[in-house]
Amino acid sequence: MDTYALLKNKIQNKKANIGIIGLGYVGLPLAIAFSKKGYLVYGVDTNSKHIERLNKGERYIVDIDPQEALSLIRKKRFVPTIDASVLGICDCIIICVPTPLRRVKMPDVSYVLAAAKTIKKYLQNQLIILESTSYPATTREVVLPVLRGTGQRLEKDFFLCFSSERVNPADKKFPLTKIPKVVGGFSEKSTELACILYSRIINKVFPVSSPEVAETAKLLENTFRLVNIALANEFALVCNKLGISVWEVIEAAKTKPFGFMPFYPGPGLGGHCIPIDPLYLSWKAKKLGFKTKMIDLASYINHFMPKYVIERLEKLLGSRDVRLKGAKILILGVAYKKDVKDLRESPAIEIIETLQSKGANVSFHDPFLPYLKIDGIDLKRIEFSKKNLKTFDCVIVVTDHSNIDYNFIKNNARLIFDTRNVYKRGGENIIRL
């Protein structure tokens, strides 16, 4: 039986061992999903604290029940480890490592390269899938040359695909299993193997003709959001000049049953996907002699929003004869999105840093984060009381977590600057973005 037929048989009969490299927001849900379907999954992570927390039944990923993970570990269906040698007994290996941007807005594929080099040590009759979002041709130009360095033949001795992650943390409506999977391999055999594998845990799998198509589709998804959020943010700036509510404008526009999809403004973009992923495409395009004007402009507008929040705050305080320097400001929510504890690219960080640089006395409350120690910021979360809320010159709603008593804040705060439209009906002490 050749390698393709052997792998296909193992996957179909749940005899394939699956290795997941990276147990973060992408890798851990995948590992749990495959384990629950009866596969033996080895989760490899360089962060020993992640392994320790999993083995203790402690939560560190919002979408994963730690007790469920612990149960799978005890049943020996899921083996989290820092020992990469387990990849040698895996039939399918999925790479789920970070792909950050460097300060000069160049993609950093060092984690992908490191993962490929690790796999190279154990490569033999395996299906390899890259899920880490990156620029078009990363699978071909970064992963493939490393694996070919073993002397093994693509589509004969090993199979290689790209399948973009589409995880949306804390989204109960669209969990991993309900989000269609796009798969692009180097041949029909690679693509078919990956499709069979993913179809065991995901309702719909959509094959495409190449890794580059799958990679670029992921970037289009997030560029679409980047551009439309930038448009909503620009409308917020214009509506403020016009003296009308951008929120009311959007509600009116979305009554149109065709040709319109609502996007909403905010204090800035956070997370790994929207503010970063489109810049991979921008970088790649520049290498090919093409300038992505729309992506670059949208990125500029979205990155301007934290500064705009500060500008609006200074004017709001000034209208009440309060100077920003020395003012007491409470930041409500510091995670990059509601109901998660993830700080990646959070606009709250820039807002706090700017406020502190201007001499404001800044405090924060976030139900998911007891302290904030990042980029020179060192703060402990404050708890609410009628007495301490009244001491703040302004409360800024930056992240609209669900488990916050907004009525209590409304009834006790002097001034609220709401950047997320939490207070849809407004109020005497409420100013919306």
Image (spheres, helix red, strand yellow):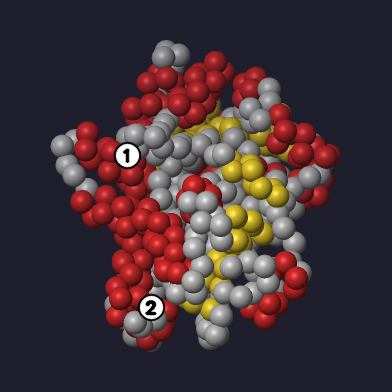
State which tag comes first along the sequence, 1 or 2: 1
Q: Is residue 234 left or right of residue 324?
A: left
Looking at the image, is 332 positioned above or below residue 426?
A: above
Which of the image's four quarters has the C terminus? bottom left
On the question of residue 158 being in view, the answer is: no
On the question of residue 114 being in view, the answer is: yes
Considering depth in this image, is 43 or 380 the residue closer to the camera? 380
User: How far across and down, in percent of the image, does residue 51 sit?
Assistant: 73, 34
Label 1 secondary element: loop
Residue to which mark 1 is pinned: 136
Q: Confirm or deny contact between disc 1 and disc 2 (CB under 8 A).
A: no
How many dots with numbers? 2
Q: Residues within 10 Å of mark 2 (few under 14, many from 20)?
A: many
Q: Label 1 sits on what residue type? A: Pro
- The residue lying at 39 percent from left, 74 percent from top is 262
Considering depth in this image, is 207 or 253 the residue closer to the camera? 253
Q: Is residue 381 left or right of residue 71?
A: left
Label 2 secondary element: helix
- The residue lying at 49 percent from left, 47 percent from top is 357
- The residue lying at 63 percent from left, 66 percent from top is 392
Residue to which mark 2 is pinned: 246
Q: Label 2 sits on what residue type? A: Val
Looking at the image, is 319 positioned above or below residue 273?
A: below
